Image (tube, grey):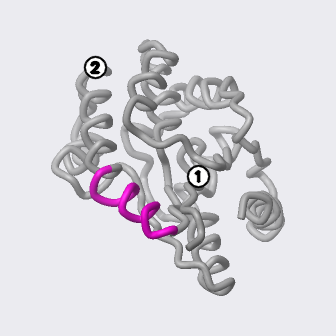
Amino acid sequence: MTKGKIIAFEGIDGAGKTTQSRKAELFLNRESYSPFYIKEPTYSPSGKKLQASARNGRLSPEEELELFIEDRRWNVEKNILPALAEGRIVLLDRYYFSTIAYQSARGLDAQEIKDRNEAFAPIPDLVLLFDLDPDAALERIRKNRGETPNLFEKAEYLRIVREKFLQLDDAYITKIDALRSIEEVWLQVEEAIKAVL
């Protein structure tokens, strides 16, 4: 049985994480792997509260952090660890690196967030960090998705979040220029994924 692996797709809203993680899922299925795809926040009770807060009004940084950790703990127990035990490749559309970037951008301590998550959440084999200027990202959200940016998607806030992401420097993080076309970005993603298989 193949050893299970975790590949996380990270970056600010509108950077292309979902597009590329879905392409990765199709690619891995074609290559006869059995990927397990999940998006955070999940559909757990804590995840649903977070999704509602993006529409209705953000919680305090501390409340938000606790909900993200509760939701991730649920995801690890219910989804990630069972999938890894089956030798599957777990594709995460956001993981704890988003919590580090988004919550530290609100003033919480990045290292403390990282430590709290790594106390229970498996460290990924690969993090693909999609880097994009917030103005370009928000334009994509409006144009490509036809959506109004939510409360996590304000330009000034996303500038700080982007900086927090770019400060992450673990060896398993691959930074990707997300300004390129979907296919050009995919070539970088595919190469990085093949390197960890």
What predominant SS class does the magenta segment belong to? helix
Q: In this view, does 94 lie above or below 34?
A: above
Residue 30, image x and y in percent? Answer: 65, 87
Q: Could you tell me residue 33's position as x and y percent?
A: 60, 79
Horizontal and vertical percent for residue 86? 44, 69
**Quarter of the picture holding the C terminus:** bottom right
Q: Three-letter amino acid code at disc 2? A: Glu
Crowding at dot 2, Cα within 10 Å, few <14 / some 14-19 / many 20+, comes out as: few
Question: Which residue bears the numbered disc 2?
Answer: 62
Label 1: element kind = strand
Q: Quadrant of the N terminus?
A: bottom right
Q: Which mark is residue 67?
A: none
* Residue appearing at x 28%, y 29% in the figure: 64
Residue at the spot x=49%, y=21% of the render?
105
What residue is shown with label 1? Answer: 9
Q: Nearer the viewer, residue 108 or 171?
A: 171
